[in-house]
Structure formats: structure tokens, C-alpha cells
Amino acid sequence: MSAGAARRSACATLVQSPQMEPAPITVQYCSECGQPWPQEELARFGDRLICVNCKIAYAQKLREGVASAATFTYAGFWIRFVAALLDWVILFVAGMVVQLPFARMLQSRSIEVELMALGAVYLIDMAIGATYEGLFVSRYGATPGKMALDLKVVRPDGGPISLGRAVGRYFAKIVSGIVLAIGYIMAGFDSQKRALHDMMCDTRVIKVPSRDRQGAE
Ligand SMILES: [Zn+2]
């Protein structure tokens, strides 16, 4: 056997020895496209992992400030729909109570009296809705319906909502609801899941991260 062949076979033995086998590849997922990648091929941006395909577009987003809130999980249309339904039930019950003192007026034979009672009930309902939304959102970041589903209303940077903004958002929701609730449906199509009232008030609805939930106890 020549010296060269000996070296080659030693080499081959070395390559085949178990110590030289590559470590098992850890697969992780790109935060942008969701594709699985070997861990070492993903770049870390904060707590997000970005693959080579998404890197340029993501860096562009960071430069434009769009991804400054990238750690949020925005809440989509359906979970918000369920939260709104819960709030609606609560406010519906409150509305029933409000109607009680007006019950006789609402059944009046005089159309004027009936309209006045309807108007009063409508205004009181609206005041209750604005107070409910304003106080809960400014104080706790969420209405009871949103709290039940671990959703939170925040500013684009994750900051809290002032009372004025929360009340303004209540009225902006009325605008969202005007034409076939299209302002609400918009949340399903926006990259940050903004409904029309979120755009008007510069707010976002996010899912509360589990670590915040534990800390809040
Ligand atoms: Zn990707």
C-alpha cells in the first residue's frame, strides 16, 4: 500500500467515525413566512427569526418603522368578533335595564312620547357604551369581552390608551359599523389587523403575550 492510499483510507475512516457525523439539525420557523429552516440559516432580529428569503423585505420594513411593533401578535377579525359579541351581550342587558323606567312611555299611544322615549333610551345606551369602552380600555387596556379572550387595545408602540382616545374609539366604531360593518371587516385584510376605527384612532388590538398574563396575576 502506498503512503497516499494509506492516508486516504485513514481519512475515510475518520469521515465515517461517529464523532464526525454532523449534529442533528435543529429546525426552526421563519417568523415572516413560517417556513421551516435549519436554525443556523435564520437570522435573529429581537425575538424573531428571519429566513434568507425574507431578510431583505424584513430589513426594509424595519427601516420604514413598520416592524417596530413586530413582537405583537395582532388579533384577527374572528376573535375580535367573539369579544365584541360578549361585550354586546353585557351592554344589551344594561340596555334592557335602562328601558325599564321608559317602559310605559315606549308603549304610549302618542307617537311623540314614544319617539322621545326611544331617543332617551338611545342616548343613555350610547352614554353607557362610551363609558364602558372608555373606562375599561383606558384603565385595563380591554373591555370585559376582550379581557375574556386575552386581547388588548394598544398604541402602535404597545403603549396604553388614554381615556379620550378610548372614548373617541367608541364613536369611531359607530363609523366602522355604518355601511354593512365594512369598517370592522377591514381588520381581516390589514397586515396589522386594523379595523377602520383602529386606523382612525391609531390603535392596534393584540393578543396578550402569556408572560404578561402570568405577571399580571
Ligand atoms: Zn421567511
Image: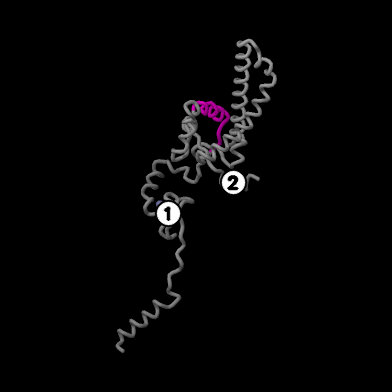
Q: Is residue 24 left or right of residue 110?
A: left
Is 172 contained in the magenta span? yes
* Mark 1 Cα-neighbour bin, 10 Å: few <14, some 14–19, many ≥20: few
Q: Which residue is mark 1?
A: 35
Identify the image quadrant of the C terminus. Answer: top right
Q: Which residue is mark 2?
A: 212
Q: Give the CA distance from mark 2 to mark 1.
A: 27 Å
Dot 2 amino acid type: Asp
Q: Quadrant of residue 13?
A: bottom left
Dot 1 amino acid type: Gln
Q: Position of residue 204 (x, y in %)?
A: 50, 37
- Classify 111 as above or below 147: above
Q: Is residue 35 left or right of residue 166?
A: left
Residues 75 and 81: in front is: 81
Q: Which residue is at a point 69% across and 21% down the rendered structure image?
A: 100
Q: Which residue is at a point 38% across and 50% down the rendered structure image?
A: 54
Q: Which mark is residue 52?
A: none
- Classify 89 as above or below 106: below
